[in-house]
C-alpha cells in the first residue's frame, strides 16, 4: 500500500473515533440535563421527586463513568500510536 493511502485511512479512523467520542459526551450531558429537568419538573408539580432522584443517583454516574472510560481508552491508544510512529521514524 502506498504511504498516502495509509495516511488517509488513519485520518478517517481518527475522525470516526473523534466523532464517537464527541457523541458519547453529548449523549451523557443530554441525559444529565434531562434527568435534572425531570427532578425540577416533579418539584414544580408538587410530585414526589424520589423516583427521579433515585434514577439520577445511579444513571448519571454510570454514564459519566462509561464516557470517561471511552475517553481514557481513546487517549491511551493515541499515545501508543504516536509513540510507535515516533519510534519507527527514528529507526
Image (cartoon, rainbow, N blue to C red):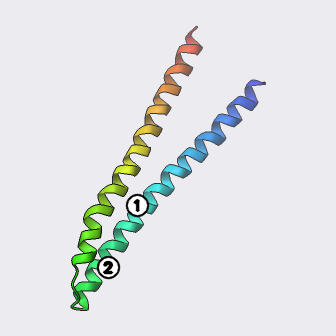
Give the left or right position of residue 27, taking residue 47 as reference.
right
Q: Is residue 90 above or below residue 63?
A: above
Q: Which mark is residue 28?
A: 1
Alpha carbon separation for disc pair 2 and 1: 15 Å
Q: Measured from the top left, where is residue 74 in percent x and y? A: 47, 39
Tell me the quarter of the picture where residue 59 sits. bottom left
The quarter in which the C terminus is drawn is top right
Q: Which mark is residue 66?
A: none
Q: What's the residue at 27%, 78% (across, down)?
A: 39
Q: What's the residue at 21%, 77% (across, down)?
A: 50
Tell me the quarter of the picture where residue 11 sits. top right
User: In the orientation shown, which residue stands out farthest toward the right?
Assistant: 1
Q: Is residue 9 above or below residue 16?
A: above
Q: What's the residue at 33%, 72% (across, down)?
A: 35
Q: Is residue 51 above or below residue 48?
A: above
Q: Measured from the top left, where is residue 8 in percent x and y? A: 70, 36
Label 1 element class: helix
Q: Measured from the top left, where is residue 55 in percent x and y? A: 29, 69
Provide the residue designation for mark 2: 38
Amino acid at each position: 500500500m502506498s504511504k498516502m493511502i495509509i495516511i488517509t485511512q488513519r485520518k478517517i479512523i481518527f475522525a470516526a473515533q473523534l466523532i464517537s467520542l464527541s457523541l458519547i459526551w453529548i449523549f451523557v450531558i443530554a441525559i444529565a440535563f434531562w434527568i435534572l429537568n425531570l427532578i425540577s419538573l416533579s418539584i414544580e408539580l408538587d410530585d414526589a421527586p424520589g423516583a427521579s432522584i433515585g434514577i439520577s443517583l445511579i444513571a448519571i454516574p454510570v454514564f459519566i463513568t462509561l464516557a470517561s472510560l471511552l475517553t481514557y481508552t481513546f487517549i491511551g491508544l493515541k499515545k501508543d500510536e504516536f509513540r510507535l510512529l515516533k519510534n519507527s521514524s527514528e529507526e
